[in-house]
Image (cartoon, rainbow, N blue to C red):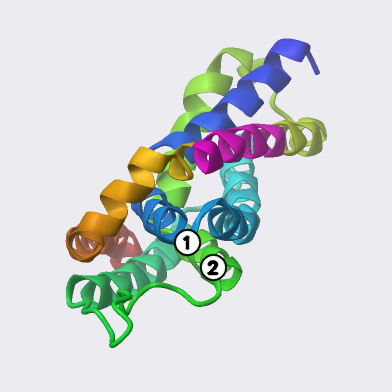
Amino acid sequence: MTFGLLMASALAGAAYTLAPGPAFLALLGIGASRGRRAGALFLGGHFCGDVLWASLSLTAIIGAREIGTLIFDVLGLICGSYLCWLGVRSATARRDADGAVTTEPRRPLLRGLAFGLSNPKAYPVAVAMFTALLARYASALDWRAFAPLLAAACAGFVAADVVLVSVIGAGVVRRFYRRHALWVTRVSGVLFVGFGLHAIATAGPGVWRG
């Protein structure tokens, strides 16, 4: 186990977290409308999903020859369906009597947990990030490296989360969101549906063949 390999895993974790996607858009809305604390809670819940998908990605990379793809294709179908449902809700959002957008979560920690565990971007993006950055260390990738690599990836997740919390709490971001919250939510919902349909289309053939 070398320092370079650990740094590569940490960078993969950070790049995965910072890559724009459904969770990034959800975090933008939550943090900009309710502040850094709510955004940090969302990321705290989402961290559980980060660890799960990183673990599955490292498992697939290290044990590619022994493990098939069927289970991941089934997960893709489930995640894609969930995201489509969430997207439809966001695309049809309205303001309630208090002026708040109806889809704004009351419990950002639980929303982050649900989003992290069901984000259809998670597995394919995580695999791509870890594969790209760990490829040069292929000869050192065995099961003994799993735990240290996962720990390094978690350090990358946390570092990226700190950056995200700082950004979403910026005054210009919060002012923009307050002014355009409803349309940001609706446009995000359409994007969520697109991500969900892509996940279903990608996973469906694998499940059918399996």
**Sequence-wise, which precedes: disc 2 or disc 1?**
1
- Residue at left offset 22%, top offset 75%: 88
**Residue 114 picture location, percent across and down:** 52, 70
- Residue at left offset 42%, top offset 67%: 74
> Is residue 31 a member of the stretch shown in magenta?
no
Q: Nearer the viewer, residue 173 or 55?
A: 173
Q: Circle 1 — which element?
A: helix
What residue did someone put label 2 on?
108
**Residue 14 picture location, percent across and down:** 56, 31
Q: Which of 62 and 26 is in front in this view?
A: 26
Q: Looking at the image, do the residues carrying marks 2 and 1 touch, with CB atoms under 8 Å apart?
A: yes
**Circle on res. 190:** none
- Residue at left offset 29%, top offset 68%: 208
Figure quadrant of residue 158: top right
Residue 140 visible to an observer of this rendering? no
Figure quadrant of residue 63: top right
The magenta region covers 153-166
**Residue 85 picture location, percent across and down:** 29, 77
Label 1 environment density (alpha carbons within 10 Å; few <14, some 14–19, many ≥20)? some
Question: Mark 1: which amino acid?
Answer: Arg
Q: Is residue 96 above or below residue 142?
A: below
> Is residue 154 a member of the stretch shown in magenta?
yes
Most distant residue in the bottom direction: 97
Which quadrant is home to the C terminus?
bottom left
What residue did someone put label 1 on?
34
- Left or right: residue 1 versus residue 48 is right
Spatial CA span between label 2 and label 1: 10 Å
Q: Circle 2 — which element?
A: helix
Q: Which of 129 and 18 is in front in this view?
A: 18
Which quadrant is home to the N terminus?
top right
Question: Mark 2: which amino acid?
Answer: Pro
